[in-house]
Image: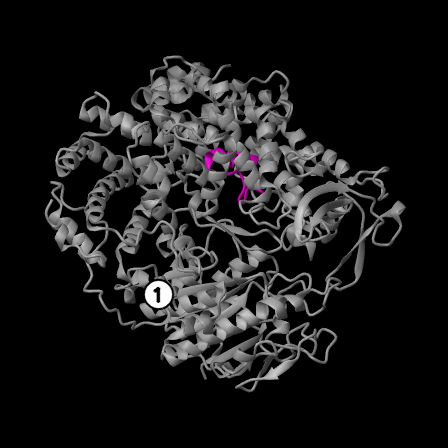
Amino acid sequence: MVARALSGGCCSAALARLRPFFVASSAVILTAAPFLAIPALAAAEDARSSTLTATARDDQTTTTDEQIVADIDELIRSGWRSAAVRPSQPATDAEWCRRVFLDVIGRTPRVEELEAFWADRSAHKKRELVDRLLDSDQYVEEYARHFSAIWTNLLIGRAAGLDRRSLVNREGLEQYVRLALLHNKPYDRFVADLVAADGRNKPGEADYNGAVNYLLAAQDDAQGIQATAKTSRLFLGLQIQCTQCHNHPFNDAKQSQFWAMNAFFRQMRPLRTLDGDDIVSVRLADQDFAGEGGNPEDAEIYYELRTQELAIAYPTFVDGTTIPKSGFVEDVNRRDELAKLIVGSEYLSRAIVNRMWSQFLGYGFTKPVDDMGPHNAVSHPELLDRLARAFVARGHDLKSLVRWITLCEAYSLSSRLAEKKAIDDPEAGEPPLFSRFYVRQMSAEQLYESLLSATGAKQVLSEADRERVRREWLSQFVIAFGNDENGEATTFNGTITQTLMMMNGELTKQATECKPGSFLHEVATSDAKDDAKVRQLYLAALARQPNGRELKLAQELRRARGGDMIGALADVWWALLNSNEFLLNH
Amino acid sequence: MSGHARFTDCMTRRHFLSHLAAASTLAVPAASFTTALRANAADLKRRHKAAILLWMGGGPSTIDIWDLKPGATTGGLFKPIATSADVQICEHMPQTARLMHHLAIIRSMSTREADHDRGRYYMHTGYVPNPNITHPSYGAVVSHELASELDDLEIPPFVAVGGASEGPGFLGMTYAPFVVSSNGDVRNLDANLDSKYRVRLGERMQMLAALEKGFVAQRRGRAPEDHAKILDKTLSLMTTRQMAAFRVADEPPSVRERYGNHDFGRGCLMARRLVETGVAFVEVDLGGWDNHTGVFTALEGNLLPRLDQGMSALVEDLDQRGLLPDTAIIWMGEFGRTPRVNANVGRDHWARSWSAVVGGADIKGAQAIGATNEDGTAIAEGSPSFTSEDLMATVLHALGISLDKSYISLNGRPMKIAGGGHVIEQLFA
């Protein structure tokens, strides 16, 4: 069964499945608006849907994208039914297009891209756009840049590598991630690379391996404590840092488990080459570990219990799997073994599915997204299972995951509230139902790229310089705490600092100064009528047409400028770029 | 266009908005997104209380600063010295020692969060982190409660110098900290807006106001509304004369030298200027206390000299200007550090027994509240112990803020102000 494209298609598919019941309930169907029909058919659909899901689950190997998307839709809808919540209407084509450009390649669409999508009459145009954004030569670089920033920030934070004395070469990690994304490296191999990486950290050096920068960012303590906590949280979705010192207060995690995981990192050594006080080069390597008792054949570690007694730990994975106790790298490379165990664990796929879902939908199935376990309720447990297994069956293909999520119904909904009061309100702490698209701030990276795209100036800088300028701009919002957790904060989200930057900053100035070659200049000096010019600006910034009142206001501005249309357009453009509608992903 | 000549460079927000209404030739009436225009804000006389939090990021080793154990194996390398009060503190804090009659040490802080992120959140909000609610931090609570007395304040009521503090949580972004660096430069703030630009800005703001309102009317959630409020605050910041409060460089060299030629010293000096102007809460960050290795060299060589200089200058300056009775001072970090010195001559995270310091406003200085045992490994028998909630309740009480208040968080749950903590009575006896 093929799920049709989303605006309205899902409902007809639902009706088609229930043909035998159609006659009996026809009175209800005819009088109700499309989405309202779903609750009326609830009882009938429930019986069918559970069979549907069971079939899909059993038939992994021949599961198509369409099948998976249909299952996602059904499982989300069953959540709406249980909560008796009416979902919002579908988003408009333009809203959806803007959203998917922002979320897949990290910027708003240009006018011609938007108009091309509108004009497309294909029944599968959403699928085709997503495919183009992920795979075509035209867009794959932008996709890789967007997600390499997301991954780099996740792996080492926003502040790492900016300090002169840092072991981390930020560029090295970004490069590694970007290449992995360009070549669509399977996620399990990506994780294995990062966990087991050795080599030098800077591009251009012999045996350079950008992936080492992930663990090099977690070397503030000499015992791999930070590396343990971060690896477990990021890749397994398990937060064990509390159990470094004591058993977890409200789940079953034990202190012994933390140290058993930590033991995997004890052969790991960052080797610095110094020139005076300056770090010239860093190599991450694995060296023989003699164990804290001094017997490398039986290389144990000690940790202190709350009673101040010492306990012993050997490398043991979270599921209890052990490896040989030798500390000799030749016998057992502990990080290699850890990488295999992580990649073979069911936690891996659940954690990445949860994270990717939250990346696109604003919230994951658990809160926080990387604290999964029996202590933390899952909002859609069947859906999480389904997606996790589909992801593994698809060879850990990240692009497939992006396709399933962007083409599902929940992602296609409008962000306008369906009811008077926000019933589905995860911001207030409730579990999300995904009955509408949750409005969220653009990230600093998305805003930067969107402003650049909106400015439309020709690319004169080299790639390296472009990245440097971007990094400098992004760093203005980052505050590093300088503690052993690499804590950091951002002043970007909805603050006065961000607004000052938007109103008076360099990027806005460049976008609105109407230099020849810029988008604004092109629009302003074209032959089109005034209203058409204003329309271009609205399409570029907000992906919609201006309404009558807005066109009138623009005309007023022109009068106020003494007829200077170019000046008036610059004003309109400034206002559009500073508006909440531009800055938010809705 | 007429009306330019009426502009001066130092324009208050009221004048800006009224000019906008009068001189603009846009037919659409001036959209104002603020409520009422205020009375003349020219020379603000601060009538309300304020608080300054000296935040020691990383978890300071309080056993080496405020509660020394010279005889014990945990005693470390420093010796205690006498002070102007009946307490002894570290020998490397001599200038602060002269001012201890203004300050009280709470030696029996006992908390449970020894993780940086959790500890910082807990000490700033009085609540442990919860994935479903973001609680408001000190500065947001204080500015929210004192809001009615801050009508004439045109700069943000909550300022964080040199660090990010914690956010406003469910109180909303209008109570977020305004983060600045200690040199007083605010990036992207065009201090000298010329008159032509101001008129143009006014017209652009009208266009923007229409866009904002239109989008908010589409009912897509809270984020669009929050943005509109922040625009208003930002405009205020761009046009007010009170921005001068951030300009630490305007102080005479002798004053700047007294505070110290480093970020923390400048931050403390900025804090004094800000509370003078009417800011309700200033947080000044001094980071680098996460001394898992080489704690004594780090303290003696780097951290304590700067702390001593900046903190003592601030207390003394506030006192000499008559501001101390209206300004509460808090000194603390996420937690303390282990009594036991580790193998790297450092101390690790320790929340079980540590010190915080308070003073100013109605708080009685010249005393130590609570005690730890002989080697600092536990609260002394018979001594009361205090939590972040208690400390917050105490500070709010000193500022004249009622503790009977409950907030309603976004999901409708009532949350007691200061997490329901108890005032430390001994500090007000």
The residues colored magenta run: A354-370
Which quadrant holds the C terminus of chain A?
A: top left
Q: Position of residue A459 (x, y in %)?
A: 42, 28
Colour theme: one colour
The residue lying toward the viewer, choosing from B126 and B80, is B80
Which residue occupies 38% across, 18% down? Answer: A24
Residue A38: image quadrant is top left
Does residue A533 appear in this view? yes
The residue lying toward the viewer, choosing from A567 and A305, is A567
Q: Is residue B197 left or right of residue B50?
A: left
Using the image, name the chain to which the residue with label 1 belongs.
B
Q: Is residue A60 left or right of residue A490?
A: right
Q: Is residue B130 left or right of residue A207?
A: left
Which residue occupies 57% across, 30% down? Answer: A178
Indicate whether residue B352 is drawn in magenta.
no
Which residue occupies 30% across, 27% down? Answer: A539
Q: Is residue A203 left or right of residue B172?
A: right
Q: Position of residue A248 (x, y in %)?
A: 66, 53
Indicate whether residue A363 is drawn in magenta.
yes
Q: Residue furthest front?
A: A276
Which residue occupies 39% across, 80% down? Answer: B320
The residue lying toward the viewer, choosing from B215 and B268, is B268
Above or below: residue A249 compared with residue B201:
below
- Badge 1 is on which residue? B279
Q: Secondary structure at mark 1?
A: loop
Task: Look at label 1 and name its amino acid.
Answer: Val
Q: Position of residue B335 (x, y in %)?
A: 59, 65
